[in-house]
Amino acid sequence: MTLLLIAIFGALGCVVRFVSEYVVRRHHPTLRPWATVAANTVGSALAGWAAYRLIGNGDLHLHEIVITGFCGGLTTFSSAMAIPALLQREHHVGYSVALVVTTPLLCGAAFAIGMGLAH
């Protein structure tokens, strides 16, 4: 049952990321991946919150469903690395480097903030 819930919540996270990308690009057409950065940051913050708040509660699988399922579907390392490569090919080297450097820092900070908020 846990595996099924992880799959369902992972799919939900993917849909949330896709819809956010669609909405941002529809209202702000740009090559810059603002929705991907936002999804990775929000997902990292939620994972930090869940790591602190949900581990050790009565349901042993709830943190797996939230962190591995929803947050895993919402965040995406492949997009975080593929988009800079595509930007570089389009001669947007500055944006590409900025994403490669700032995404891990931003997500790490968001995870720590999420844990702090749960505390």
Image (cartoon, rainbow, N blue to C red):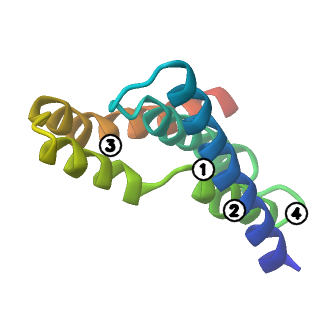
Q: CA distance from mark 2 to mark 1?
A: 7 Å
Q: Assign a secondary structure to mark 3.
A: helix
Q: CA distance from mark 3 to mark 1?
A: 15 Å
Residue that mark 3 sits on: 104
Quarter of the image holding residue 42? top right
Q: Quadrant of the C terminus?
A: top right
> Are the residues at dot 1 and dot 4 in contact (C-beta closer than 8 Å)?
no
Q: Amino acid at mark 3?
A: Pro
Q: Amino acid at mark 1?
A: Leu
Name the residue located 69 percent from the left edge and 51 percent from the top edge.
Answer: 15
Disc 4 or 2, which lies upstream in sequence? Answer: 2
Q: For residue 44, which numbered disc appears in the image?
A: none
Near-viewer residue (53 or 14): 14
Pinpoint residue 115: horizontal percent, then vertical percent: 59, 36
Disc 1 or 4, which lies upstream in sequence? Answer: 4
Mark 2 crowd level (few <14, some 14–19, many ≥20, 10 Å Cα): many
Name the residue located 81 percent from the left edge and 61 percent from the top edge.
Answer: 62
Q: Assign a secondary structure to mark 2.
A: helix
